Image: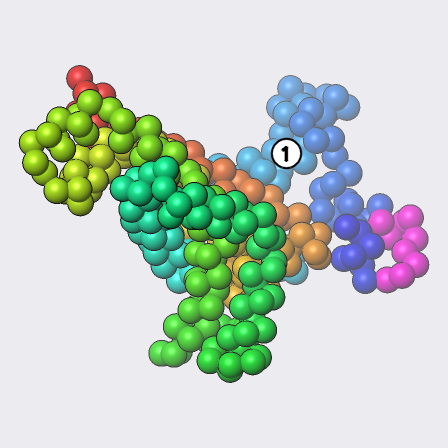
Amino acid sequence: MAHMQLGSKYVTEEAITEWKKSKGYEKPLFFNTQSNTLNGYLTDTIFFNNSIKLFTFDFGQSDQGRDIGADIYERMWPSLAIALPTFILGLFVNICLSLLVTIFYRTKFDTSLVIGAIILMSISGLFYIILGQYLFAKVWQWLPVSGYSPSEDFWKFLILPVIISVVSGLGGGFRWYRTIFLEEIEKDYIKVARSKGLGEIEVLFKHLLKNAMLPILTGVVVIIPLLFMGSLITEAFFSIPGLGSYTIDAIYTQDFSIVRTMVFFGSVLYIIGLILTDIAYAWADPRIRL
């Protein structure tokens, strides 16, 4: 880190020591056993000086002197612009396709879709990005290959990343929801609904989908931090100035102030997601409230 920040090929030990003192990295991590006071034993440490303020959401400044809180606020919007459409569209496509397959369970159509899902899961996400950029941007020239603009035509820069993100996650999402729905389709309440003469679409969307909400909510909570944190790979390859590329750049330049903040921010979002999931459980299943 010192070599990167000092920007010199040959850095003396004195310069490194001075840099560590200026950043407070010469102190112990958690406990300062050399301190003469109990207060200094806990407070005169790297963790207390650099990390404890994060719990008050005081993110401080990066090693380049930029306000990290302002950067997060500025960069969260491009991340949300990609993550929200990807999340909504991907969830809709996966659920509808998985519900459709339950009608054709154990048929050639079902087998073909499962094989296709396994093939999609076996291909690296980088392949989808490179292929999409080559076809849509270079060969057909329908969309820009990368970049982002906050102007009115910003949507042109989002179409390709959103489509690629949905397609790359289609295999795993389809198999996940298919397994959930197949477990429900054999239960007695489905047989009773069909015996009453209800249409298959009504049975699937009104009865099966409602009773499968709990495992669906469990899978959705994992995605909640990504809605704000952004996709590291997608934003890096498409030059989207979101939180994902912000984290990647910080790792590359070893700006530990930003990395520490983003790890903390992601952890807080994940905990909030878990709490919201428990609340959603009670909303989706009245038996839990009782």
Along the line of sight, the residue nearer the viewer: 30 or 273: 273
Asked whether, in this view, residue 144 is left or right of residue 208, the answer is right
Describe the element under mark 1 as helix, strand or loop. Answer: helix
In the image, what residue occupies the spot 71% across and 52% down? 254
- 118 in magenta: no
In the image, what residue occupies the spot 74% across and 34% down? 27
Magenta-drawn segment:
8-16
Asked whether, in this view, residue 128 is left or right of residue 41, the answer is left
The colour scheme applied to this rendered structure is rainbow
Residue 133 in percent (x, y) is at: 56, 71
The residue positioned farthest toward the top in the image shown: 290
The amino acid type found where label 1 is placed reads Phe
Please determine whether, in this image, residue 288 is positioned above or below residue 128. Answer: above
The residue positioned farthest toward the front in the image shown: 108
Residue 36: which quarter of the image?
A: top right
Query: Dividing the image into 4 quarters, which one contains the C terminus?
Result: top left
Asked whether, in this view, residue 268 is left or right of residue 43, the answer is left
Judging by the rendered image, the residue that carries numbered circle 1 is 47
Residue 19 in percent (x, y) is at: 79, 50
Labels in figure, total: 1
In the image, what residue occupies the spot 60% across and 44% down? 260
In the image, what residue occupies the spot 49% across and 46% down? 115
| Residue 70 visible within the image | no
Along the line of sight, the residue nearer the viewer: 140 or 107: 107
Please determine whether, in this image, residue 243 is positioned above or below residue 208. Answer: below
Q: Residues within 10 Å of mark 1 (few under 14, many from 20)?
A: some
